[in-house]
Image (cartoon, rainbow, N blue to C red):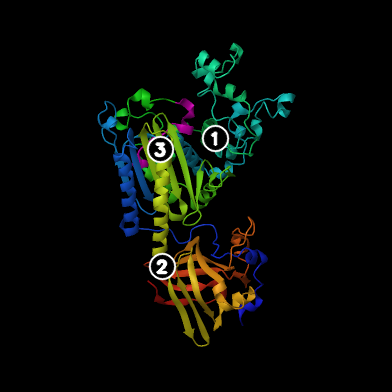
């Protein structure tokens, strides 16, 4: 019996949201690419990147800066691409290395926050996100009087501030305590020129961190809007020490540095002879101690170690994949549609060649500026470390340059590898069974089903008829996207089945991709019609395809190239 007889009509959401092009589910269009180093598209893209970076160096646009660029994959033990540039001021300097390489030590500034949060993840950190930080930091258990409890403008109610809010910059607390406070850093005449009144001696800032923090007013209500806070990550460092019952330095060594075999990363200031030191130690701030704020911005690392750190996240070396997926999610929007905030991820959304989220973290301290980024869809990342006069925008510009060149290349590589591996005709013509599926790739995301026959019934025509599309399969899109679910010898994909309209539909809601609302709407015998699984031999080659709801496995009879 034809199982489509029991299928409901395409939901209203799918029909009104129909687009001229397919509307994919959020996530990778193809499995992540592998063996990048030998891929001609990757090689060409990195050659283009090298040419652009060298042009910037030769033109003088990057002068005054020593730079390291690393691109790495979670499936390899080495970097897929490395570029180093040593500024003349470092070559001719008197302190530090004369040439930047894999093992040169940089300060990574606020990328330290990412290391701190990875440490939390090794303690199954997301389970702590809903807990008040005062549970672990008794100094914040402030005995409120009656007026303080109701005064939301002048006092932070620390009993309501959670670890997750601190980690995602949503605690509503100030960026820093005392650091760069103009009262302490600017002379009185400069303050007067800015129109700032003199302050009485009674308002002298307390040196003790918690005493000053408890006297600091909130910037916003908790979980209302992200407000970047270094002080929040200092507090998280104290909370982590309470959870682990060990000093932060010891936790860092035991849970990241030693397990990953990092040889040039540390919490304490390393020997300056190992580092890149622009100008001198004082001007570069290579040896500037930031005390207990180290979890927010004090870690030192090298290009090689940063790539190893990134691979560990992608490959789930220290934290299992379930915890990693929970961690790598937005926690809040910002006023920009392209930027969201995580724990403490700065998530950049690129719209081309499709919607791709890149999870990044920037860092700045002294003359050291950096950016670290991961693309989970492609199982790849990059780390850009700079030392010099370029300021915090330099690695951001370079990072955007890397993303603009590499993301389209990675998407094309993933598509090409999927074409070679998955496309073709899968068929079973045995007895009364006449079933086949033909899969190709084209200019849209995912594997396209061009023909689907089940027991001599054209499934494309049947779906089109149910959707009111006059049995015209050309008005129906059927595409397979990877689900990320795997078992030995099997890889899971999900079919996105939707009608295509002749013209774009105006309006924010109706023109949106509502695919996620109805992905598993078609069920037959408790198995979703969209559930597909490719079956592999011991060499990882695809040998058959199973549309699970139809209870049949179709051998691969012809591959497409």
Counting residues from the N terminus, which is met first, the one under dot 3 or under dot 2?
Answer: 3
Q: What stretch is highlighted in magenta?
A: 290-305
Disc number placed over residue 450 in the picture, else none: none
Between the residue at mark 3 and the residue at mark 2, the CA separation in whole angstroms equals 38 Å
Q: Residue at x 66, y 27 (%)?
A: 155
Location of residue 445 with respect to 292 vertically, above or below: below
Quadrant in which the N terminus is drawn: bottom right
The residue carrying mark 2 is 419
x and y percentages locating residue 469 in the rendered image: 62, 75
Image coords of residue 308 (percent x, y): 38, 45
Q: Is residue 533 above or below residue 264?
A: below
Q: Residues within 10 Å of mark 3 (few under 14, many from 20)?
A: many
Dividing the picture into quarters, in which one does residue 556 lie? Answer: bottom left
The numbered disc on residue 394 is 3
Q: In this view, does 299 lie above or below 428?
A: above
Query: Where in the figure is residue 380, as x and y percent of width and height?
Result: 41, 51
């Amino acid at each position: 019996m034809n199982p489509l007889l029991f299928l409901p009509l395409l939901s209203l959401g799918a029909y009104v949201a129909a687009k001229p092009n397919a509307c994919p589910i959020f996530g990778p269009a193809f499995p992540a690419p592998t063996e990048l180093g030998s891929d001609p598209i990757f090689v060409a893209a990195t050659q283009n990147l090298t040419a652009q970076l060298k042009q910037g160096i030769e033109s003088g646009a990057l002068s005054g800066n020593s730079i390291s660029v690393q691109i790495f994959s979670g499936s390899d033990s080495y970097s897929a691409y490395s570029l180093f540039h040593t500024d003349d001021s470092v070559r001719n300097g008197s302190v530090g290395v004369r040439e930047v390489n894999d093992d040169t030590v940089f300060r990574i500034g606020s990328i330290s926050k990412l290391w701190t949060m990875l440490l939390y993840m090794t303690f199954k950190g997301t389970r702590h996100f809903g807990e008040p930080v005062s549970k672990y930091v008794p100094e914040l258990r402030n005995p409120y009087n009656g007026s303080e409890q109701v005064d939301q403008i002048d006092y932070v109610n620390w009993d309501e501030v959670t670890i997750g809010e601190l980690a995602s910059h949503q605690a509503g607390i100030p960026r820093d305590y005392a650091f760069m406070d103009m009262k302490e850093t600017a002379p009185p005449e400069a303050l007067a020129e800015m129109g700032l009144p003199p302050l009485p001696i009674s308002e002298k800032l307390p040196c003790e961190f918690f005493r000053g923090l408890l006297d600091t007013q909130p910037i916003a209500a908790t979980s209302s809007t992200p407000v970047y806070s270094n002080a929040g990550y200092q507090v998280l460092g104290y909370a982590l020490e309470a959870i682990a019952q060990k000093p932060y330095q010891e936790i860092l060594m035991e849970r990241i540095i030693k397990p990953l075999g990092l040889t040039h990363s540390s919490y304490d200031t390393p020997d300056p002879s190992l580092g890149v030191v622009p100008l001198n130690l004082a001007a570069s701030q290579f040896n500037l101690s930031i005390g207990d704020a180290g979890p927010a911005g004090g870690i030192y690392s090298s290009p090689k170690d940063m790539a190893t750190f990134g691979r560990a996240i992608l490959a789930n070396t220290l934290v299992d994949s379930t915890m990693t997926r929970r961690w790598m999610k937005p926690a809040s929007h910002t006023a920009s549609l392209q930027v969201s905030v995580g724990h403490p991820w700065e998530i950049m959304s690129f719209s081309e060649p499709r919607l791709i989220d890149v999870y990044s973290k920037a860092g700045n301290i002294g003359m050291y500026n950096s950016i670290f980024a991961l693309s989970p869809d492609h199982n790849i990342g990059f780390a850009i470390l700079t030392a010099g006069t370029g300021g915090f925008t330099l690695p951001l510009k370079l990072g955007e340059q890397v993303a603009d060149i590499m993301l389209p290349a990675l998407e094309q590589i993933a598509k090409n590898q999927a074409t070679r591996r998955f496309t073709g005709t899968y068929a079973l013509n045995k007895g009364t069974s006449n079933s086949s599926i033909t899969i190709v790739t084209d200019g849209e995301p995912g594997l396209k089903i061009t023909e689907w026959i089940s027991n001599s019934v054209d499934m494309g025509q049947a779906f089109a008829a149910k959707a009111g599309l006059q049995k015209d399969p050309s008005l129906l899109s059927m595409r397979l996207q990877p689900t990320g679910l795997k078992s030995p010898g099997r890889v899971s994909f999900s079919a996105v089945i939707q009608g295509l309209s002749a013209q774009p539909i105006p309006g924010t809601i109706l023109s949106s991709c509502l695919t996620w609302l109805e992905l598993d709407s078609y069920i037959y015998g408790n198995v979703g019609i969209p559930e597909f699984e490719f079956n592999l031999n011991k060499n990882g080659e695809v040998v058959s395809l199973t549309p699970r709801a139809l209870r049949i496995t179709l051998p691969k009879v012809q591959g497409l190239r």
